[in-house]
Amino acid sequence: MKWDRVRRGVLGLLLVLCGWMALSAVAEARPKVALVLSGGGAKGAAHLGVLKVLEAEHVPVDIVVGSSMGAYVAGMYAMGYSADEVIAKTQDLDWSRGYQDKPGREVLSLRKKQQADEFQLQADVGLNNGRLTLPEGVYQGQGLAALLRDATSNLPAQKHFDDLPIPYRAVATDMETFDAVAIDHGNLAQAMQASMSIPGALRPVELEGRLLADGGIVNNLPVDVARQMGADVIIAVDISAQLKTRQQLDSALGMIDQLTTYMTRAGTERQLALLHERDILLTPEVNSFSVSDFASMRLIELRGESAARGMVKRLQALSLSPAAWRAHLQARLDRRAQLGAQPAYYIDHIEVHNHSRLDEGVIRKLLAVPTGEVQTTDDLEEAVARVNAQGTLEQVGYQVDARDGRNVLVVDVKEKSWGPNYLDFTLGMEDDFHSRSDYTYGLSYTLTNLTPLGAEWRNEVVLGSQKHFRTEWYAPLDERLRFYTRTGLDYRSESRPVYLSSSQTLGDIQVEDGSRYVTLESGSWKVNADLGWNRRPWSRFELGVEAATTSLSIDGYSGTERINSAGPHLDYLYDTLDSRAFPSHGDYVAARLSGVYAQGGWLLPDGALSSVTNFNLFKAMSPTERQAINLRLSGGSSTISQMLPMYLQDLGGLFSLSGMQRYQLNDRYKLFGAFIYRYRLLDNDFGAFRYPVYAGWSLERGNVWHERKEINWNDMYTAGSVYLGADTLFGPVYLAYGRASAGEGSFYLFFGNSFGF
């Protein structure tokens, strides 16, 4: 019995060995199949349909090569994902993220939030030595890099792409020599990005001394690369655009597009000439779709599937038997398991490649990634977003390298090549169709990273109905950017009405019965010196002093009064709103307590010591995806007896007792509350741009009083509004109608940077 078991065991082993040898012989005997995928933006979804048919027909892929969008699909398949997995991952990606370099408002520092709110046209134009400079692309690739890292599960750098479950090449264009470059090692996401970076739209990727961009420029269907890798049979999928007819050449843009298509087609035709009789060419019908039509990816995928089904008999000639197909899939899965792609990494060491004027210590503190702990992909993306939020960096990239059994987080930081000094702009218009029509336009000029800790010198000029000039020196004091100093010189001038009732006075101006408006013209010079503490990236305290000299003239009264004032102040700011104009979540708290000694002219001949307080509380929440509710509570007080414009508490205007005119109510004490509802009607998603349109209404209540003892809930005005709004490239746009309980009604139009709210 014992020997029988031994004989049976030996016989079984021999049978397994024979089976393995037979399978190996079949594998060696079958042709090596390469899949070559061309570029075409969103039309690359056709490749997904082709993959689906190949797997359904048990057609093995031994080599995969791609250009542009084809490089992405090829890279995902090379990782060992099944066709269904590649389809699911591709369709789940928000491709508009690839064209969103700037970090969301919620991750910006408070200083950057304020700058972006006040100068909403963030042109990011460089101004250096009197010369305007622009970036190498509209987008710097920060968003696309994050998107591709997410898609590839943060796959560590590979010594060679032949070691992937399916040997892979991404084809890019060397923008200096216009040579085609087949990327065969390194970081997979970076290789994809290099092949996908359309010149002018996306900044080229600098890789090993080369400036690489879209592979479709010189080799959109890299048949030659697949042949060099040893392919016996090539399945080529061509989705590149076709030349337009004469009837379609009806515009200058059409002519430019025709020229671009010709250049791409010329390279494609050269590659098509390399195909052999055994090779298979698939040309999905996707000309009716655009390269940015990511919303139609499912339909485009079906076009690719249809093209492959049309050649199914030729594809079936490459099919494996069920047993051989299972063995092929298992081998691919085994190699996939060895890749090391994972959603989290134990970080042993951090290596920073700093190509900026920021101190490396600052970068490490902003990263705030501890060593000796597990970090998820989300943790790492949030870390680089914090660094990128400084606003002076062109790109912040990272990868996890496996070195001698240790995981090294490699962070690359590159300062903007068109900096370090930048221009931004503001534009605003407000009209109530009744008494006021205001407008402003202006620019800011910021000199950045003047010290290793990131000091900046900012200059602002605003003209129009309100004039404003400010120059400010801002200097962080520590590597964590927690403490800072801020010193500035500021000039403001404006014309505004002041409402006087029988209980109010402005110097010698009194109203015996009823009320009246007087127009105040003011011009004020102010200097300040503040010490700040960034308690959190979204909250801060400031303690400082300021001194001002203000000239006042009153319409109808001769002479100009000059008031000098000085005093300390304490400020607190907390801001986690995702948007200033249309917030859907977050909180905002602003409070100021000032002590003021003011003296001057006939308004304050003996001087006055007073206090001024202001607070503004705001909460945004979204009960559903398309709805938002905003709650606001604000108020303030001034103990100074005179109705001076710089210390007045005022109400009036849209969302500030809608229906009333701006500045209609003004006095020493104020209390106001509002409930604002908003519904997102349209998304208006144009790929790289999204301009949502909203409709909503508001309910408001508030008033101003001369004496504190007069404050009474029953002595308040009730108001409300209905409105349409849009979040545009140039800032928010509002068209609204408001009505107050006092009988006032008014239409409003706001555009860009608003005046009143």
Image (spheres, rainbow, N blue to C red):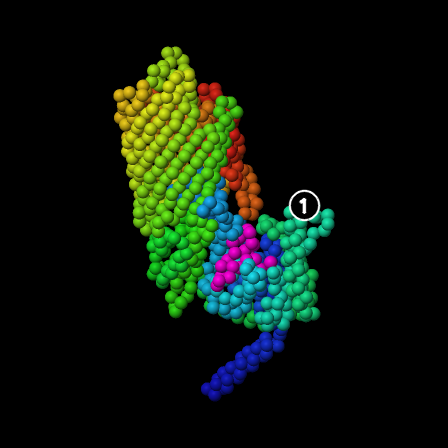
Q: Is residue 545 among what the camera can see?
A: yes
- Quarter of the C terminus within the rendering: top left
Image position, residue 611 (x, y; %): 29, 28
Instruction: Give the number of marks.
Output: 1
Q: Residue furthest right?
A: 246
- Residue 25 in the figure: left or right of residue 650: right
Residue 579, horizontal then vertical, whole percent:
45, 40
Could you tell me which residue is drawn at 51 percent across and 23 percent down? 434
Q: How would you rate the neighbour count of disc 1 (Cα within 10 Å): few for under 14, some for 14-19, many for 20 or more?
A: few
Residue 336 percent coordinates (x, y): 50, 66
In percent of the image, x 42 and y 61: which residue is there?
400
Left or right position of 581 against 44: left
Q: Which residue is mark 1?
A: 251
Residue 690 position, x and y percent, is 54, 43
Please, what is the three-letter code of the amino acid marked with disc 1? Ser
Residue at 72% x, 51% y is 245
Q: Residue furthest front?
A: 129
Looking at the image, which is closer to me, 629 or 126? 126
Magenta-drawn stretch contains 379: no
Residue at 50% in and 66% down: 185
Q: 712 and 750: which one is in front?
A: 750
Residue 146 higher or lower than 683, as above or below: below
The picture quadrant where one finds residue 545 is top left
Region of the chain picked out in magenta, as a range: 196-217
Query: Residue 326, can we see it?
Result: no
703 w.r.t. 587: above or below: above
